[in-house]
Image (spheres, coloured by chain):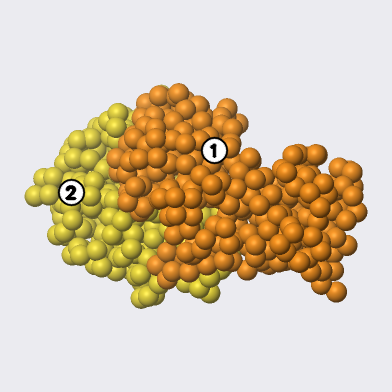
Chain colours: A yellow, B orange
Amino acid sequence: MSIEANVPVAAVDWGTSHLRIWLLDMSGAVLAERRSDEGLLTTGPDGFSAVLERHLLDMGAPAATPAIICGMAGSRQGWIEAPYVTVPAQLSDVLARAIPVPGAQRDIRIVPGMAQRSADAPDVMRGEETQLAGIADLLAAGRHVVCMPGTHSKWVDVEDGTVAGFGTWLTGELFSVLSKQSILRHAVGDPVAAVSASNKTFRHWLEQALASPGDMTSRLFKIRASTLLLDLTPQDAAAALSGLLIGTEIGSAGAQFGWKEGEIALVASGPLSDLYGAALGIAGYRVRPIDAETAVRAGLLVAARQNFGPRETRKVQA
Amino acid sequence: MSIEANVPVAAVDWGTSHLRIWLLDMSGAVLAERRSDEGLLTTGPDGFSAVLERHLLDMGAPAATPAIICGMAGSRQGWIEAPYVTVPAQLSDVLARAIPVPGAQRDIRIVPGMAQRSADAPDVMRGEETQLAGIADLLAAGRHVVCMPGTHSKWVDVEDGTVAGFGTWLTGELFSVLSKQSILRHAVGDPVAAVSASNKTFRHWLEQALASPGDMTSRLFKIRASTLLLDLTPQDAAAALSGLLIGTEIGSAGAQFGWKEGEIALVASGPLSDLYGAALGIAGYRVRPIDAETAVRAGLLVAARQNFGPRETRKVQA
């Protein structure tokens, strides 16, 4: 069964700690929107259906509205496992391989993540593939390096519309666990305001890390020592930690990708976009900023068209 | 007042999470010994005296027995702050600057830590200076690089008996917080047996990290990905994390010190000594193993002689 252009689709980004649902028509117009913190961590295996149906009811979605989902809901710990597509993979192919959720009262499909099945550089992503598909037009011809910062920052190497390889940097998670759980909690304090890209301490530690990303684990302790010996304030300690971790990520990724200058497509939103935009500029790159939320919504629309559109016969398992 | 050779001294290593007390005679012979987990974290500011007196009573120490203390008991959060000695500093000078604990019922002195007061590389140590003083004879002539692994690993550059500089790597603490508090807890599991130096996974990740210490934060996620894609076991995930962190430390320290080959004095005990001994060997160094506990006891004896010995007039504050 194909769906008509005026029948809405539920586009769902279901991550580890967040849930975003948009009711879209097939032209991409947003009819309704919901955001919640009912991510994978707070939604048990039996709860996905109940959570989704409650939000769709609230949003006034018709009963037959199909739903397309990306993110950690498709992981082994999620609703149903959507097997990874192995790279290299053409961006235009990945989302068409969404798998149906069996036994659901509507057509619900979860798109696959991507896996790099290399013995030396194994890696996985879930959710970012949909953002990439949403900006596939920008990545069509030539080589593009994409930076997608976050808890687990992804850097992606795209050549002529094909994901050639990617890597993950644990930057956001390191900032969180080190500032809350390590000796650095005495330096950073709690809570702190968001780190600003214009902070001079952020810039100083960023530049040091860009110059020698291999010294990160010794520089971490120097944040603590700066509190003891140089009266570093908690706000500046947070800026130092952020600059150190982001600089280490950019220095390491640039070297791994052999991409020391030129353009970086930065897929991010809000304060993280400002921070990485400034950092990549300091590192010498030209930055092409792309809003992460717009990208994922565009990718989910691509997935909806590929999976529910006229070319596709809708199969619902018994 | 000087003390006689046959009067014992209490030699105390009081760290963040441990307390060790030896009753020594002035020749260094161990008359009694106590170990406890009453470190800085579990001993409040008012508790230091009570904890020490209870142990000394248990050990049968005479009432006039003086006590010499090193470690975090001398920090701002400790019993009384013993100001840092600034490097460069002659090892033979540092411990003579112990400061008395006022109002105590016996002569109790705490040795200073050392500080590197450099705007670009601020650093501090407390406890390791005493281990270094305990092996000063081995470090007397020429240049020596000393590796002192642990929660906060110290690397120390000693030239002709003078501490020229040092650095700290957060290796042990990173292993702990990442294996317990981060996404890697799913890979490493809990509890795991100690990592063995003969584990092939340890060696593989160590060699990768030695080759490019700047990629640590991306390799961290590859441990998680190896669990998902390559069936890495929890035991091997712990070995991978250990190899990655230790290799990053050695690669970074070797580069910072400009010391890529030659001898390293390894001051460590137990399993950590085996692990770092193997790792330094793989990195191409000749390893001179030195037992950390023997070193700290020897250093405390040096401090006792310098502070309570015949050359020194004992001053007790009113």
Residue designated by label 2: A258
Residue sitting at x 41%, y 50%: B142
Residue A312 visible? The answer is: yes
Q: Nearer the viewer, residue A161 or B290?
A: B290
A252 left or right of A271 in image: left
Tag 2: amino acid:
Gly
Residue sitting at x 78%, y 45%: B25
Tag 1: amino acid:
Ile
Please tell me whether mark 2 sits on a helix, a strand or a loop: loop
Taking A281 as reference, is B145 above or below it? above
Q: In terms of image quadrants, where is residue B220?
A: top left
Chain of the residue on which disc 1 is drawn: B
Residue sitting at x 37%, y 75%: A200
Residues indicated by labels 2 and 1 sit on the same polypeptide chain: no
Image position, residue A159 (x, y; %):
13, 45
Image position, residue A243 (x, y; %):
38, 64
Residue A225 visible? The answer is: no
B84 left or right of A89 in image: right
Q: Nearer the viewer, residue A241 or B264?
A: B264
Image position, residue B161 (x, y; %):
49, 55
Chain of the residue on which disc 2 is drawn: A
